[in-house]
Image (cartoon, rainbow, N blue to C red):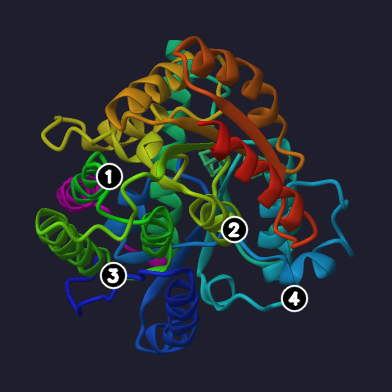
Amino acid sequence: MTDASTPIELPRTFEEFNEQRRQSFLKVKDFKQAGGRLVGYLCSYTPLEVIDAAGASAVGLCGTSDEVIPAAEEVLPANLCPLVKSTYGFAYSQKCPFTHFSDLIVGETTCDGKKKMYELLGELKPTHILHLPQGRSRAHEREGWYQEVVALKEALERLYGIRITDDTLREAARLRNRLRRATLALFELQRAEPPAMSGVELMSTMFAGTFNFDVRAYVESLERLGEQRRAEAEAGGSPVGAGAKRILVTGCPVGGVIGKVGATIERNGGVVVCEDDCGGERTNRFMVDEDAPDILRAIAERYLKINCSVMTPNEDRFVATREMMEKYRVDGVIECVLTACHTFNVEAARMECAVEEAGVPYMKIETDYSSGDLGQLETRIAAFIETL
Ligand code: SF4
Ligand code: SF4
């Protein structure tokens, strides 16, 4: 685990976010040359504490750009989720330094597209696949998942020739919990009217966390950002107009469509007050029981609570989303489904009912990383916000 705490400037705009990502790409080579351990991961179910406890930095590899999709389509079918294609495309075209410099990529059996893509990715890079159960209500599913977390720990021990102890796991859990608390504190600021931050800033900040090698430095930066934004809000300095319609964004991970969806909402009189996706409350509200006698089991249990549509049943997602609608006093819910994401797309029918039963308007958009549907999205989002 890294202890250095070089301050990290967090992005306020989408352009700053892109620039910081570029800078991280440049830094990763030096990090590796200095002997740093790097493990790439994709999914929110990846138990990051185990990677931290191996003394490695965990970097998110989820592809968020359409630039490498033509390369990916030389191998993968075109009618696949852009996140899957983009992730593979970056590895295949060797354009992602994080993928290139990762000692290991940790994948998972979540959706079918990702699961099968990892087999191809495994031909390019050493890959370890976590077998995530389809649900969490049966005891054998929870036990099987715990064994998968044990297997990841053992794989990292073999890879680096080390022993991961309970003490290092507990220390990692404490730091990750601190990160989650700082994230939730930042989200909390969005409850104000007007909220303390633009949604684009919030989304970019969350996504920036996936490509920082230094967890401690990122935590400290988030805590500082929270204090700054709180002070600005208390002084009446919100960047958001008083009448902006408060939008909850739910569905697929939105890292690749921050500019396309987040910015479009905010150009058209809305503000994203909360994110109900992998970078938002869906993932961050669960803590590891740091004092549990079996810390590895506590880590495994924490991750299995995440309410992603790859789980069945997934009732708790609707409950949590409705709680968020109330907490953030949202005017409307926009569900963002990435093209060919069957699990979120099918679950959207139930989400629509859950949201509308609470008396809140709902709209689903399906999109990918291209700019082909920008005009159509702008029209639909503007019309939706107009009706709120
Ligand atoms: S949406 Fe689900 S499957 Fe995709 S990264 Fe998030 S938790 Fe994993
Ligand atoms: S957005 Fe959906 S299809 Fe795409 S990787 Fe995540 S779960 Fe799979």
For residue 93, the mark is: 4
Task: Pick the quarter of the image with the N terminus.
Answer: bottom left
Query: Is 81 one of the magenta-colored residues?
Result: no
The residue carrying mark 3 is 214
Q: Amino acid at mark 3?
A: Asp
- Residue 105: image x %, image y %? 55, 59
Quadrant observed for ligand 2 in the rendered image: top right
* Residue occupying image coordinates x 28% and y 37%: 296
Between discs 1 and 4, the one toward the N terminus: 4
Q: Is residue 161 magenta?
A: yes
Q: Which residue is mark 2?
A: 256
Disc 4 marks which amino acid? Answer: Ser
Q: Amino acid at mark 2?
A: Gly
Which of pointers 3 and 2 lies earlier in the amino acid sequence?
Answer: 3
Query: Which tag, 3 or 4, sits closer to the chain's start?
Result: 4
Disc 1 designates what residue? 190
Q: CA distance from mark 3 to mark 4?
A: 27 Å
Q: Position of residue 93 (x, y in %)?
A: 75, 75
Q: Amino acid at mark 1?
A: Gln
Cα gap from disc 1 to disc 3, whole angstroms: 26 Å
